[in-house]
Amino acid sequence: MPNSLATDILKLLQQHPQGLSEHELLQLLCKHSCFASLTANAQLALFQKHFILMNALYQLQEELWQTQHTKKTLNLEISPLCIKLQTSPPTQQALSTDHSNLATYYLDWNNFQKTTEEDVSLLLDNFWSIFTKNSNRTKALSILELEPNANADTIKERYRELANQHHPDKGGDQETFIHIRQAYETLKSN
């Protein structure tokens, strides 16, 4: 089903060659008629707006990709932080695998229709769980003065160094030692 947003999105992106974020696009299109009949539930309505926008973007991307120009091709780059038009030489390459995975989901209108308030709540809970876990890991790595890509052996070795250095029995600060221990336990459990 053709998405009526696609034409308006193309116009907006042509007016903003530097690109727009998904949030900026939604703000500019918030009064569009395709959003008029959305549910009253705020979380579900936000998901539905996102879905409608992504559906239009992937339809537009596919349409642009299929329309090959003789000297250059207009491509649509889609990411949450920057959606923009780019020109490039004509290519015979297929769209990327990333495109096909996301596009398959967003171009299937059944995914829009069957998503419930409960589904959106579960998605959000899962997102925040992962976000919190990543945030805790980042904080723990910082306490142990380690890089984000530190492996288990490096973490264990650094913990032992810092624990030995800050252990209260060796003249170290008890509170610092506790923070080091908690950071290590957080990283060990991840």
Image: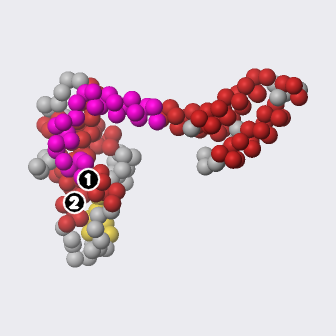
- Residue 47's x, y, as percent? 27, 35
Quarter of the rendering occupied by the C terminus: top right
Q: Nearer the viewer, residue 100 or 48?
A: 100
Query: Which of the 4 quarters of the picture holds residue 25?
Result: top left
Q: Compared with residue 87, is residue 149 higher up or lower down, i.e. above or below?
A: above
Q: Secondary structure at mark 1?
A: helix
Tell me the residue that label 2 is attached to: 62
Q: Callout 1: few (<14), some (14-19), or many (20+) C-alpha neighbours within 10 Å?
A: some
Find residue 103 and name its label: 1
Q: Which residues, given as a range, are shown in magenta?
A: 103-130
Give the percent coordinates (x, y) of residue 138: 59, 38
Q: Which color scheme is applied?
A: secondary structure
Rendered position, 150 above or below 74: above
Name of the residue lying farthest toward the left: 1
- Left or right position of 172 against 77: right
Name the amino acid type tagged 2.
Glu
Are the two marked residues, 2 and 1, in contact with CB atoms closer than 8 angstroms?
yes
Q: Give the residue drawn at x 65%, y 45%.
A: 152
Tell me residue 32's x, y (percent). 17, 38
Q: Residue at x 18, y 27 (%)?
A: 39
Dominant SS in magenta: helix
Q: How many marks?
A: 2
* Rendered image: mark on residue 63: none
Asked whether residue 15 appears in the rendered view, the answer is no
